[in-house]
Image (tube, grey):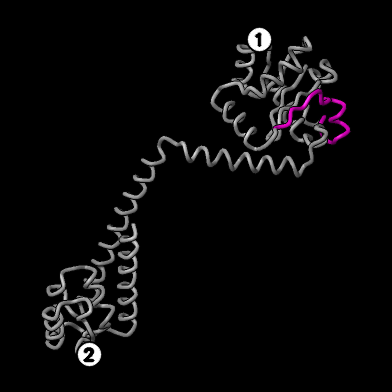
Amino acid sequence: MLVLFETPAGYALFKVLNDKKIEKVTDIVAAFSDEESASEVVKLQAFKKFKDTKEAFTATDKLINGMLPKTLEKFLKKNVLSEDVQDTLITSDKKLGSLLKTKLNIDCIQNKKMDELVRGIRSQLNSLVTGLTETEMKSMTLGLAHGLSRYKLKFSTEKVDTMIIQAVSLLDDLDKEINNYMMRLREWFGWHFPELSKIVMDNLLYARVVKTIGVRVNCADANLSEFLTEEISAEVKEAAEISMGSDITDTDQKFIINLADQVLELAEYRLLE
């Protein structure tokens, strides 16, 4: 039996040294407990190293999409078909096995025991594949992972729609939060300065007034003309002098101003969207 093993660095073809022994082994993974034991089970017959990450990415992309990479086709023709090998080929991917049977007429098998054999090879891969360092393998793995991630993000057919949906949902959530906070702010500060709600109808302007004055007695000296018209500013100051609202504690004032700050921060963030 031969085992086809695809790695980020290239294709490996392993020869199972004793087919009958493998069939009788109950725990194949245990047979790969160390390098020496693994070398008694399988032996590297051929290895095709990718030239660079681009070649690895191209091959992986074709396999993912159910196509046979040219590099893999040439590798198998050279090391299996041209040698007239009669052994059965083991693959961990059923789709790949069917593809090889259709394209190259190579018999492939996949079952639970063979999957264990592949896992065993993976556990001792660095020692079984000569001429390939662990550092090279990690570098190729990382490069291939990054390439596939960028490719999937770039060519996702639902990417644009997903971004729009997320943006719209965020705007809805922000509007709800701002409205809820403003309702609490008007109710809370309304006990202290109820007349303000009838004069300043805009929520954000209301929050700015609250943050600027803190308590109504500060209206006389507050500069409200930066965000209110002269007429409305004068009306607010006049109403503050004759307001029928109750007094509030320093603690209440602190929490009310913090609430006004949160409203303004959320509103500013929403404008960025």
Query: Could you tell whether 226 is left or right of 87 in the image?
Result: left
Q: Secondary structure at mark 1?
A: loop
- In this view of the protein, can residue 244 be seen by the observer? no
Q: Position of residue 136 (x, y in %)?
A: 74, 42
How far separated are the C-alphas under marks 1 and 2? 91 Å
Q: Which disc, if any, is residue 105?
A: 1
Category of crowding for the residue at label 1, using alpha-carbon neighbours closer than 10 angstroms: few (below 14), some (14–19), many (at least 20)? few
> In the figure, is residue 173 to the left or right of 60?
left
What's the residue type where badge 2 is placed?
A: Asp
Residue at (55% x, 22% y) in the render = 66
Label 1–label 2 contact, CB within 8 A: no
Disc sitting over residue 175 in the figure? none
Residue 175 appears in the figure: yes
- Residue, x 31% and y 49% (percent of image)? 168
SS category of the residue bearing label 2: loop
Of 53 and 173, the residue lying toward us: 53
Q: Is residue 199 magenta?
A: no
Q: Please report the bounds of the magenta region as a residue range.
A: 31-50
Q: Position of residue 184 (x, y in %)?
A: 26, 68
Q: Quadrant of the N terminus?
A: top right
Q: Quadrant of the C terminus?
A: bottom left
Q: Is residue 115 above or below residue 102?
A: below
Q: Give the residue type that dot 1 points to.
A: Asn
Where's residue 189, x and y in %? Answer: 23, 76
Instruction: Tell me, yes or no, whether the highlighted magenta stretch contains residue 40.
Output: yes
Query: Which residue shows up at 75% across the image and 15% down it?
Result: 80
Q: Position of residue 34 (x, y in %)?
A: 84, 36
The residue indicated by pointer 2 is 221
Query: Is residue 62 or residue 170 the one in the foreground?
Result: 62
> Horizontal placement of 258 versus 194: left or right?
right
First in residue order: circle 1 vs circle 2: 1
